[in-house]
Amino acid sequence: MESLVSYELSEGVATITLNDGKVNVLGFAMQEALNAALDKAEADQAVVVLTGNAKVFSAGFDLAVMKAGGPNVPKMMTGGGKIGERLLSFPRPVVLAVNSHAMAMGAILLMCADLRIGSDAVIKVQLNETAIGMVLPHFAIALAHNRLSIKWRNRALVQAEGLDAHKAVAAGFLDEVAPAENFLAYAQERAKGLAALHGASFVATRKRLNERLLADLALAGERDAKEWTQVFGAFQ
C-alpha cells in the first residue's frame, strides 16, 4: 500500500493520497491499496480527505488492462464502481481534494463524495470516453443523473468536454474552488468542519438522500456486468 497510497491520520482526519508516481491509474493494485486505506480510515473512525499527487488526481482506469481485453476488464471496472459506491456509503464524511486533473474514472469518482474541492490551479475534469472510442458505463450515467446539472450532462458525457475548476463547479463535479496555496490544509479544515456534525445523523440523512441513487447504481452495476461479460468474458 505504501508505494501507491499514503495514509496520514491527524486530528480525526485521514488524508489518503494516491501516488503511483505517474497518473494514478485505478488498476488492480491501486484499487487494492485504496480499499486498504479506506479500511484503515474506517477502523480509525476518521473523516477522509482523498487527494492525488502533484501531477494528477487520477487519470482513470489502467488502459493497459483495457487494451489487453479479457475478463480482467470487467473485473477492473466493477472494482472501480464499487469504490465509488463505498465512498457514497462511507460511515464518516468523505472530502475529495482535487489538486490536479481528474479524467475518466477519476472524474467519475468526483460524483461519489460528500464534498468536492478543486484547486484554482490549472486543472481539467473530463469524461473523455467518447473521445477515445469508449462508452461510459451505466453506473457513470446513474451518477451523472443524480449529481450533475442537466444543462451540462450532454456536454460532459456525450461531447467529452474538458472543464476547468469553475466550470466543473457549475456542472456539479465540484462543490467549490480553493486557492492552490495551502490547498490540502484547507481541505483538511473543511473535513474537520464536517466531522463536527453529529455523526449518526449525518450518515442516516445521507443514506436517505442517496437511497434512490444507490438503488440505481445497483441496477446499473448489474447491466454493466452483463454487458462487459458478453464482450470480455466472465470474471470472478
Image (cartoon, helix red, strand yellow):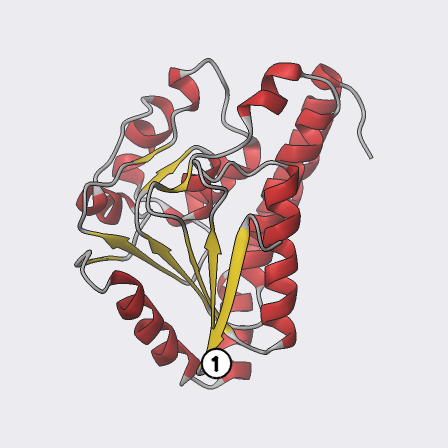
- Dot 1: what SS? loop
Q: Answer with left or right where residue 23 lies relative to residue 76.
A: left
Tell me if residue 215 comes above or below residue 134 in the rendering.
Answer: below
Tell me if residue 109 comes above or below residue 36 in the rendering.
Answer: above
Q: Answer with left or right where residue 224 lies relative to residue 202.
A: right
Q: In the image, residue 147 lies at what x, y percent?
A: 39, 49
Residue shown at 51% from the left, 41% from the top: 142
| Quarter-of-image position of residue 155 | top left
Tell me if residue 158 comes above or below residue 79 in the rendering.
Answer: above
Tell me if residue 105 comes above or below residue 176 in the rendering.
Answer: above
| Quarter-of-image position of residue 230 | top right
Q: In the image, residue 14 lies at what x, y percent?
A: 49, 70
Q: Quadrant of the C terminus?
A: top right
Q: What's the amino acid at mark 1?
A: Gly
Q: In the image, residue 11 lies at what x, y percent?
A: 44, 83
The residue nearer to you, when weighing 182 against 2, is 2
- Disc 1: which residue: 12
Residue shown at 60% from the left, 62% from the top: 38
Number of numbered callouts drawn: 1
Q: In the image, residue 231 lies at what x, y percent?
A: 70, 15
Residue shown at 48% from the left, 77% from the top: 202
The residue nearer to you, when weighing 206 against 69, is 69
Look at the image and tell me whether residue 223 can be seen. Answer: no
| Quarter-of-image position of residue 188 | bottom left
